[in-house]
Amino acid sequence: MEVSQEPHLPNYMKDDKVSQETKILISSLPPDKDFMGYGLYNYKGCWYYPNTLQAVLDVQKHFRPRSTDIILASLPKGGTTWLKSLTFAVVNREKYRKNPQLHPLLSQNPHDLVPFLEIELYTSNQTPDLSKFPSPMIFSTHMHLNTLHEATTKSSSSPCKIVYVCRGIKDTFVSGWHYRNMLHRTKMSQDAFELMFDAYCRGVLLYGPYWEHVLSYWKGSLEDKENILFMKYEEIIEEPKVQVKKLAEFLNCPFTKEEEESGSVEEILKLCSLGNLRNLEINKKGTTRIGIDSNVFFRKGEVGDWKNYLTPQMAKTVDEIVESRLRGSGLIFQ
């Protein structure tokens, strides 16, 4: 597929906000191309588009979270929207308990309530004044943990909480395929699907390889259980109440016995369900602050949808790659 055919490109995929210093850096990095032909560059083991790399470098240089802040991390299409919604609702539940009809999730897209560090706040050479943000502030990122740590470990305050959500690679890939079609406002061919699959298997995708990203947070959560929580998308689907309570406990705002008895957990799960969010007017039309159509973030959210798109051989190939890459780590996907 020729790049010129694409009618819409988000800022993070472009190369027009790159400093001269970063241009020199990029010229020294291993290059490749994504399945559509856009240039990707490998910096310290991760692949980036030029504008994204510039923003990541700016995050590392300027972002210093407070100990009360929360960072949500994931790969694109790995459960990001759901994690943002659930965390925002859990952390702010007391604030809107008496007036649930005024809850921000009913009138704002989750991505506008929980801003991305490198895709929004530090994009286009911006340096936000974090002291003006409320506390606790919830941020999100798609950065590898080692990359994120280059910023967070320089903070003068004690470590903030980091929550990572991981989704099985096959569903992440298929969700990513649909996302790219909606993102670019086009319908791509089967050839493009196979090219994207091959790139995934090689690890050449934004923030990839998948297995390196997942392992960074998995190992981090084993080494620092107090400050890094590793969650699996499939487990949230399977036992949502258990996982949401686990999330609340990790964030030091556990549900009281009274809250549990009054159905507070169930109310949050209902508010944050994909079906509910998808049908809200705010998520049906318009664009988010990062310039992406609001409806792009809400599709099926199912476990196992990959079976409708991947051939048995494709599934076998990617399973073998991931099993090989994760071997010995203790991380297993069902």
Image (cartoon, rainbow, N blue to C red):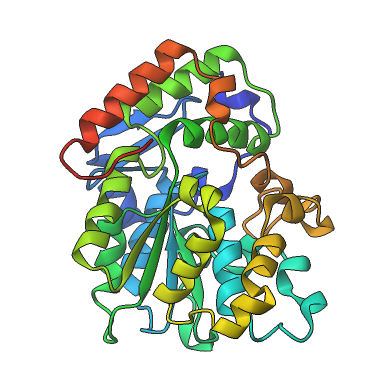
Examine the rendered structure and indicate whether residue 101 appears above or below residue 312.
Answer: below
Choose between 76 and 124: the one closer to the eye. Answer: 76
Residue 330 in view here:
yes
Examine the rendered structure and indicate whether residue 293 appears above or below residue 194.
Answer: below
Q: Position of residue 217 (x, y in %)?
A: 30, 55
Residue 285 vs residue 191: left or right? right
Q: Residue at x 62, y 70 (%)?
A: 265
Q: Position of residue 75 (x, y in %)?
A: 43, 47
Q: Position of residue 269 (x, y in %)?
A: 65, 62
Q: Position of residue 120 (x, y in %)?
A: 54, 62
Residue 14 in view here:
no
Choose between 158 and 272: the one closer to the eye. Answer: 272
Numbered disc total: 0
Residue 13 vs residue 93: left or right? left
Q: Residue furthest left?
A: 328
Residue 223 vs residue 319: left or right? left
Q: Residue at x 59, y 34 (%)?
A: 180
Quarter in which the N terminus is drawn: top right
